[in-house]
Amino acid sequence: MNSGKSIFSQLMDFLPSYEFRQCVERYQGNYKLKRFSCWDQFLCMAFAQLTYRESLRDIEACLRANQAKLYHLGIRGRVSRNTLANANSVRDWRIYADFAHLLIKTARALYLNHDFGVALEQTVYALDATTIDLCLSLFPWAYFRKRKGAVKLHTLLDLRGNIPTVIIITHGLIGDVHLLDELTFEPGAFYVMDRAYLDFPRLHRLHLASAFFVTRARKRFACRRLYSLPVNRSTGVICDQIIKLVNPVPRQGYPDKLRRIRYFDSETNKHLVFLTNNFTLPPLTIAQLYRSRWQVELFFKWIKQHLRIKKFYGTSANALKTQIWIAISVYVLVAIIKKQLNLEGSLYRILQILSITLFEKTPILEALSLSDYEIQLTTAGKQLTLFN
């Protein structure tokens, strides 16, 4: 009999339990609770994320089928659909948001020297938002259109490791550019964003914080060229200009100089115009920085495909935010173990292995380090060898 820990238990050992208890005490999450603590709730929801459970009843059925193993998984309370639904609806979602931020801090330290394709020492962030569609009859508080509900996931992604550093969940009607009002800008860092964030007063506040931005100009963009810099057209850079805004309202919002780079992308056969407040980097590097912004789009696509953030186990705002933050915690946890265990596979491969091996009592490094192309077959002791 294998007396070791299950893979799920080994996975949860990477979580800082003391810091989790601090988050719970900060919001009195276990106040007057005798059973099914916040930790039990987190473990059940993390199990649902890792095994792609469809509903609360699905979670209950799977865990009760392994009732004898739940104690060894760390789940002390009895798993019930109603109990889990009530916990998601009532217990403060900020418990899991604060805990996710602790994991994010750990992950960013591990990926500090990670290469993201651009030779740059400074931190580079990508800003974007994604819309999560909801049924308006089930989520009436998330009004978006006449017959449609939605929430937005505003995200600031650290491109070194693709770790989300800031996530703000809002109604679908909130514009993307309002995320700039919630950020504390890091001096020397680069913020790469699309045209939805082109708001000159907000960008000037970023500029005054000694941070840099890279964005795209709109089609109708009035400016006055001060002078041009030499460029190598063979790289795709058509022009590199120092400009000032012409129209009174934008010029009042951003009175300083800007850098305008026109670039031809041979892969998409498109002409792109970039705006930045950095005057030292080569123009091709600015174009590469904007291209790296696509990582945030891939991040949104990845979490929507491989985590449960499109279908929800509860209909209240608290339940929705709780599920999203626990999903983010699972994503960051997988990124942490990938780095700490020096695993070569992708996050997707790790999740796929975890989804079918959580109850097995195998060392987690052994389970996750199996080669994609080598299958080790074990034969029974009484099986005879047919060929020598």
Image (cartoon, rainbow, N blue to C red):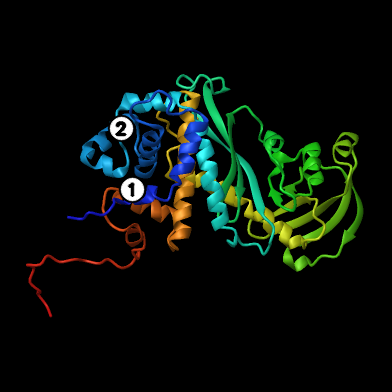
Residue at (89, 36) in percent of width and height: 252
Left or right of 245 on screen, residue 128? left
User: Circle 2 is placed at which residue position?
Assistant: 77
The single residue placed furthest to the bottom in the displayed view is 388
Residue type at numbered disc 1? Ser
Estimate the x, y position of residue 306 in percent, counting from the top left. Answer: 43, 45
Left or right of 27 on screen, residue 280? right
Left or right of 31 on screen, residue 1? left
Estimate the x, y position of residue 205 in percent, counting from the top left. Answer: 79, 40
Disc 2 and disc 1: Cα gap in Å? Answer: 16 Å
Q: Quadrant of the N terminus?
A: bottom left
Dot 1: element: helix
Residue type at numbered disc 2? Gly
Closer to the camera in the image, 30 or 148? 30
Residue at (37, 39) in percent of width and height: 43
User: Circle 1 is placed at which residue position?
Assistant: 9
Estimate the x, y position of residue 262 in percent, counting from the top left. Answer: 78, 55
- Label 1 crowd bin: few (<14), some (14–19), many (20+), radius 10 Å: many
Residue at (49, 42) in percent of width and height: 19
Q: Quadrant of the C terminus?
A: bottom left
Closer to the camera in the image, 263 or 255? 255
Dot 2: element: loop
- Let me know if residue 220 appears in the view: no
